[in-house]
Image (tube, coloured by chain):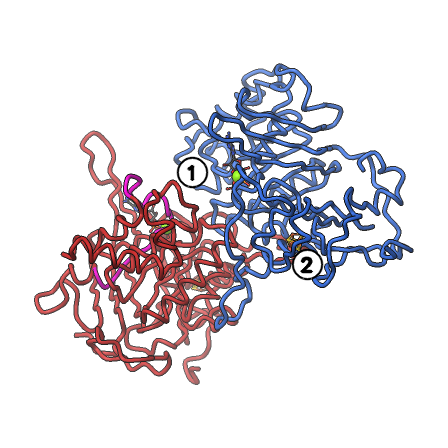
Amino acid sequence: MIHPIAVAGGSHPSPDPRDRGGPAQPMLIVQGLKKSFPIRAGLLNRTVAEVRAVDDVSFVVVKGETLGIVGESGCGKSTLARLLMHLIPKDAGQLVLDGDPVGEARGVMLDELRRSLQMVFQDSASSLNPRLPIEQSIAYGPRVQGASGSSAKAQARSLMEKVGLNPSLFGQRYPHELSGGQKQRVNIARALALDPRLLILDEAVSALDKSVEAQVLNLLGVLKRQLNLTYIFISHDLHVVRYISDRVLVMYLGQVVEIGPVDAIYDDPKHPYTQALLACRLSMDPEARVEAAPLAGDPPSPVSPPPGCRFHTRCPFVEEICKTAAPVLGDVLALAPERHLAACHMVQPGSGHSRAPDRVGVH
Amino acid sequence: MNDMSPPAVAAVPRPEPFVRVEDLRVTFVSRDATVRAVNGISFDLERGKVLCVIGESGSGKSVMMRSLLRLHPKGRTVIEGGMRVGEHDIASIGDRTMTKLRGSLVSMVFQEPMTALDPLYTVGEQIAETVRRHEKVSREAAWARALELLELVRVPSPERRLKAYPHELSGGLRQRIVIAMALSCRPSLLLADEPTTALDASVQIQILVLLRRIQREMGMAMIFVTHDLGVAAQIADEVAVMYAGRIIEYGDARDVLVAPKHPYTRAMLASTAKDQGRDHPLEAIAGSPPDLRALPDGCSFAPRCAHAGPDCTRAVPAPVTDLRRHMARCVRTRLKAGLLTFDPGVAGDPAVREGIDLAARSSPAHCASA
Ligand SMILES: Nc1ncnc2c1ncn2[C@@H]1O[C@H](COP(=O)(O)OP(=O)(O)OP(=O)(O)O)[C@@H](O)[C@H]1O
Ligand SMILES: Nc1ncnc2c1ncn2[C@@H]1O[C@H](COP(=O)(O)OP(=O)(O)O)[C@@H](O)[C@H]1O
Ligand code: SF4
Ligand code: SF4
Ligand SMILES: [Mg+2]
Ligand SMILES: [Mg+2]
């Protein structure tokens, strides 16, 4: 059984009538989530190997927060998002939505999960039907859920206003008649149509121009307050993640390597991978150039991740212990969400790494 | 106007530029519309220097780059103005010569590496083929050169990678291969159109460091297009900011990125999420760029500019260039003690029609470009 976690931080404004578990109950608990993709080859199309895209991932999402997720391409961010949305089946693990296990007899059913959780993708164009005027695209969700034509239309128009698109100006336009930023607003409106509680934004502003990105980020901020939303914000832009997130989760090769409050992560990163990733941020000052790439090479293949610490092949602090024993993150489900945790032998007391703190006097 | 005298800073004499673009205009004509994608661009670039062109989507960055390689669809494109690279007049040379110069004089790296690679051939075959298209060398020599090129762009295990197909490589490795191909015939000018936009921050910085090193070692000139100010800061010697097909600010990278003078550049810098307080909304630029089929009169940025007034829409603001060669096109920029300043309180001066170029005035060597 999974029990509610006492949350010290986090602001909980007005009580939400949709709230079942109370303000301290996490919006979402993710426990031991796993997903592998088979690699098939040969005449018999036999499985020859597996990509371990998400490999035992656990974390909580606190009500009303924005949890940022960062990591290099291929580390499993999108796979994680799709697992949370139940767009692909998981191999193992459990999801608890506002106190209720998902997909179990007495828990929330998939229908409801799909309503409470909505997702906005990076590619603003391909997620819209090119042959539907956008007002109809937005009204589609409510229609499927049983709203009448006129009420779905009215909802669509009010959503367009919420995302800053004048319904009489834009309602009848087709996706190809919109700019990237406008299309992304339509996608956000569509995601909001079913009154979700948690929005997963997978690289939702990454394809936008910087000036448009700022507009959409501001919109996300306003909507979050107005509609009492919780966000999972996936992005490779570390500046944007710092601006928008309350807490940050860092992934490497399918696993969580560090998690904690945004300022703790950015001001005092504990995991060498997080440190290197943050060092890849570019300055706006030509006199503060990065002279040598902080992370050499590509991440190793997730098909055969290195033994021990998965980062050991690129880590400047690697020692013998790192090559054999996998460092643990700590029990993210039992500890308070505002704890700053890193899966590295250097922060693990008595791990055998020369830089590890002693067993006694744990911080 | 007493702004212009006496200059407190002496203008720096400049060597003869390697690339000179003068009043370039590119118009796409079709039955239903005329798109004015580039509306009078001028700049000089020396050998061994990197010019970064920044601007929003649709501002004409790629069109300008493709003009330098004459890659536009013929019948539907009208190109006016001058483009010179080395001793070659790009606007007037014949098609055969142009084909020869592509790759050897001017070479280009595109945003999406897969578009430049053929999925059916190995990396080695493709690089060797590119080498042999330009140089009469044996198959073995071309293959050896391919290996050398992979070493140059720091591809790990290069022998093995020569035999790999593009889909077997990561995005970062593919972009290195594309760069190797672009460098295969030792171009004097490398055009790079957002070569890192599709990459992770960690790989992006690897490629930027690599390009910068190779560019220095080979003494190449490079024009690098990006919409990311951080990327520009990392790689540029000089920066040109484009808006609606015009360069609205130009200068030394630090002058433009750290002390911008044009309201658009300033607004762009202010709108980035970098180091912004979490509790405040970002200073987003309202609205969107103008429709290139129907450009507004005067300053194209006026509909979105916080400092716009009636004096902004009378005519396209003329360029004002200071002694450091920092240029802006805005009626509220002025010269003070020889340096560009932005003064929101000042009204546009109808006398400034032709623009002012302090750098050219005090440096006779440069008069030709005025
Ligand atoms: N062959 C063409 N025919 C008609 N219009 C064109 C053509 N090529 C480009 N354009 C138009 O010219 C304008 C400038 O395009 P360009 O590709 O240079 O933009 P860009 O600054 O490179 O933008 P991005 O950052 O999105 O790459 C756009 O409005 C584009 O639609
Ligand atoms: N449908 C699939 N079949 C096989 N492999 C996949 C599939 N989807 C994702 N992967 C692999 O899983 C890993 C994680 O991918 P993804 O979650 O898309 O990463 P990210 O979003 O962090 O860039 C990658 O190695 C990717 O190639
Ligand atoms: S466990 Fe070892 S290899 Fe892994 S990050 Fe820590 S020091 Fe580096
Ligand atoms: S000319 Fe006027 S509208 Fe244009 S940038 Fe300057 S102040 Fe703004
Ligand atoms: Mg992804
Ligand atoms: Mg372009």
- Is A116 magenta? The answer is yes
Magenta-tinted stretch: A115-132
**Which residue is at 55% across, 48% downward?**
B227
- Image quadrant containing the N terminus of chain A: bottom left
| Three-letter code for the amino acid on which mark 1 is drawn | Leu
| Three-letter code for the amino acid on which mark 2 is drawn | Val
How far apart are the alpha carbons under marks 2 and 1? 38 Å
**Which residue is at 61% across, 27% downward?**
B69
- Tag 1 residue: B169
Res A333 quadrant in image: bottom left
Chain B colour is: blue
Please, what secondary structure does the residue beneath circle 2 have? helix
Task: Examine the residues drawn in magenta and state their main secondary structure.
Answer: loop
Subunit of label 1: B
Q: Residue furthest right?
A: B6
Disc 2, disc 1: CB below 8 Å?
A: no
- Tag 2 residue: B258
Q: Residue furthest bottom?
A: A361
Q: Can you say whether B50 is above or below B345 in the image?
A: above
**Residue B217, percent from left and from top:** 69, 39
Q: Can I make out residue B237 in this image? A: no
